[in-house]
Image: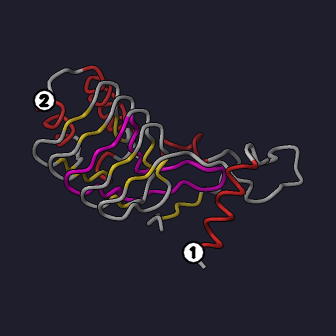
Amino acid sequence: MRRLKSHPVTAEKNSLHQWWRAKNPLVVVWQFLIITVCRFLPSLQLKILLYRLIGAKVGKNTSFGLMSMIDIFFPEMVNIGENCIIGFDTVILGHEFLITEYRTGPVEIGNNVMIGANCTILAGVVIGDGAVIGAGTVVSRDVPPGSFVVGTQMLEVKKQNSHICETRVVNKEIVQKVEEFSYEKN
């Protein structure tokens, strides 16, 4: 279960149009510059130092692959344990902007965690010690210690009768496997 705090917006525009209310724009620019440098920086120790400078908690001997990045708006929401590997082009988020609100939540990554390339870690999740996250995975809920998780499953949650958004199931085989798995658990 994700641990998120809701921050409603009241104006006519969506929450991303109001990002400057969530965080001081000068702070965001500073954090953006540091994180952008870290994406290309080959020195693992310097990356850790710079991420700590902007408020992230990063344990000893943790390695960030090329192009990986932490949250630009809320780096202080990111807590990574010791001896972890964050794979190429992985994104760790401490926020999400929605239409009528934005949400923030801490990301807790345990010790000795391996996160593959091109992963997205959403706000408010906990990844337990020794977990392995396969390449391309979207982590949208907690990962127990020692688990090996993979995949991005897009499932129809509900159909909206609006011109703005209509969700559809993209792969019925995945839905069938999820349903079978759900029945096995019960």
Q: Looking at the picture, which amino acid does disc 2 mark? A: Leu
Rendered residue at 66%/57% (across/down): 177
Rendered residue at 25%/27% (across/down): 38
Q: Is residue 179 left or right of residue 54?
A: right
| CA neighbours of label 2 inside 10 A, class few (<14), some (14 to 19), many (20+) | few
Q: Which residue is mark 1?
A: 185
| CA neighbours of label 1 inside 10 A, class few (<14), some (14 to 19), many (20+) | few
- Of the numbered discs 2 and 1, the one sitting upstream in the chain is 2
Q: Looking at the picture, which amino acid does disc 1 mark? A: Lys
Where residue 118 appears, as percent x and y from the top left, is 43, 33
Kindly state the secondary structure of the residue where label 1 is placed. helix
Where residue 145 appears, as percent x and y from the top left, is 30, 63
Rendered residue at 80%/46% (across/down): 165
The correct choice, above or below, for 29 with respect to 107 in the image is above
What colour scheme has been applied to the protein in the rendered image?
Answer: secondary structure
Rendered residue at 65%/55% (across/down): 100
Q: How many marks?
A: 2
Q: CA distance from mark 2 to mark 1?
A: 45 Å
Q: Is residue 3 magenta?
A: no
Are discs 2 and 1 less than 8 Å apart at CB? no
Q: Is residue 56 left or right of residue 125?
A: left
Nearer to us in this view, 154 or 43? 154
Pick the quarter of the image with the C terminus: bottom right
Q: Is residue 54 left or right of residue 143?
A: left
Nearer to us in this view, 58 or 100? 58
Q: Which residue is mark 2?
A: 46
Nearer to us in this view, 38 or 18? 38
Where residue 84 appears, as percent x and y from the top left, is 21, 45
The segment highlighted magenta reads 90-116
Q: Is residue 94 magenta?
A: yes
Where residue 122 appears, as percent x and y from the top left, is 46, 50
